[in-house]
Amino acid sequence: MSSPKGLKRRRRFSASQPSADDSQLEVLEGLRIMEVLGTARPTKFDGIIQFDSPWIDALNWISLLLETDTSMVADIAVAFSVGDGRTTIHLAKANGQPPTNAESGCLAAFLRTLRLSFKENNLTLTESIRRRMTDMMSEMTLPEIYRKLSRIGTVQGGTQDENWDRFLRVILPIFQEGHPRGEESSGFCELAEQIHGLAFHSGHYSSAVMVETMKSFVLHDQCKPLDKLSVEERRRFTAVVMRLSDFMIHSTFFDAVLDSDGHLRNQLDHEDFMFVIEMCRRVHDIGRYALGLSSFAEVVMPYIAGKLGKEGIAQFLNETGGIAVQWVLRPLRSPTQVPRALYWPTSPSDKVREVMNQINFALELEPLHLDRMALRDEVTALWTEGSPVAPALHSELQLIRYLDSHNISVVGNVIGMNRPPCWACYSYLRILYRGEWGQRWSMSYSTGRPRGPWMIPPGCPVEVVDTILRSMQTRIYEAIEEYGHECYGQVL
């Protein structure tokens, strides 16, 4: 039997005002349902790969440099403030946690490389700055780049060979059909000319180079193991990956994937489009390093030098001032900052069944069928009744709260992050600052998806919490509606 065409929603809101813990638990339950059961429903962000401003790219890059634990990446936010011949780098992690030794070591390596760049006394040598920073990344960031490269070929659970075959069979022919002149981006045209020794730009040769580049990304595991690379090999590999990822995200092919009215998107079915957009998004995750480094070398370095002046630069080189680092740390005994463990108040099956009572399937399923839906493994694994859950104040909110409370103005109002803001952070900032939040803070676009246990910021106005909960209610209905469609035929 086919799934129902839709759901008729009937909302029920409690007339009583919930306590802070009740609201927090309601948020945690809702986000968990959205995060797990709502993944199949596309969001308005799914077909978008965001290209940011140079300052956002540069600060995102700095936060990416601090990613050290490839098994559990922490959220890190960064902003710059300037004044009186001094630049301060403000950094924050979720819940105001202190940096790990590895993160502190990466930041120290970045500052050492920055000093070496200033010592050259010619900040127009952007290629020299790129080279120094790329060498630095080969020492401390390459393991994380390797991990991200390994994800490109595993989109939608397929193997690297399966996904490469799918790219060649399904994606590439439609691209070639819509772009008979082939790959025309300057990067791949110049690379084809270097490889083939041509005095002209041929779409045939540049297309072949683009395809080989994508193949090298998808089949990354066929590369030499990281621990087998010499220091010089690591440097060359990092430089090549940076260059090719930059070419890829500025390619004709990438533009075709992102063109909402283009031939490629119109000819692909939804599943194949989501396959290629996710593959391109993972390539873009590598390209963020190249974008950020270029923006830092071309925009941020000259700006910092101008603000520091000769005296500030001299102090930085002598390690007596100029550039300071400030981590936003949680006060040791601040009850408003320490995340208090809460406990899941009910079973996920009861929660999902409760929501199902508020929405009627078009075919009016019997209570027995709804019970079966609520008892499937996808639901029972959401959480365990009575077990603790510790909400986290995400790094960007931790940093923004600190800057706001201390009236600190940061350059361009820019917040850089190693990962884009989640749905909850995006919604909170949009609601809190209303129509002005885009002018108040500038950061990468949201993923449109929840990410882990999210803490309602301390002191958050009640009306903001209520608006978040109302917005979340719609997303919860959509998630369970999508889940109902997926398992409809299996519960009858």
Image (tube, rainbow, N blue to C red):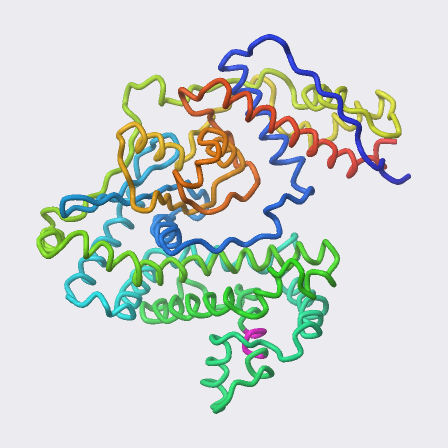
Q: Which residues are magenta?
A: 208-212
Residue situated furthest right in the rendering: 1
Residue 142, percent from left and from top: 39, 59
Residue 140, percent from left and from top: 33, 56
Q: Quadrant of the N terminus?
A: top right
- 420 above or below 244? above
Residue 356, percent from left and from top: 75, 23
Q: Is residue 153 visible?
A: yes
- Residue 351 figure quarter: top right
- 313 above or below 405? below
- 331 above or below 237? above
Q: Residue at x 28, y 56 (%)?
A: 300
Q: Nearer the viewer, residue 264 or 222?
A: 264
Residue 194, percent from left and from top: 45, 85
Q: Residue at x 38, y 46 (%)?
A: 416
Q: Is residue 387 visible?
A: no
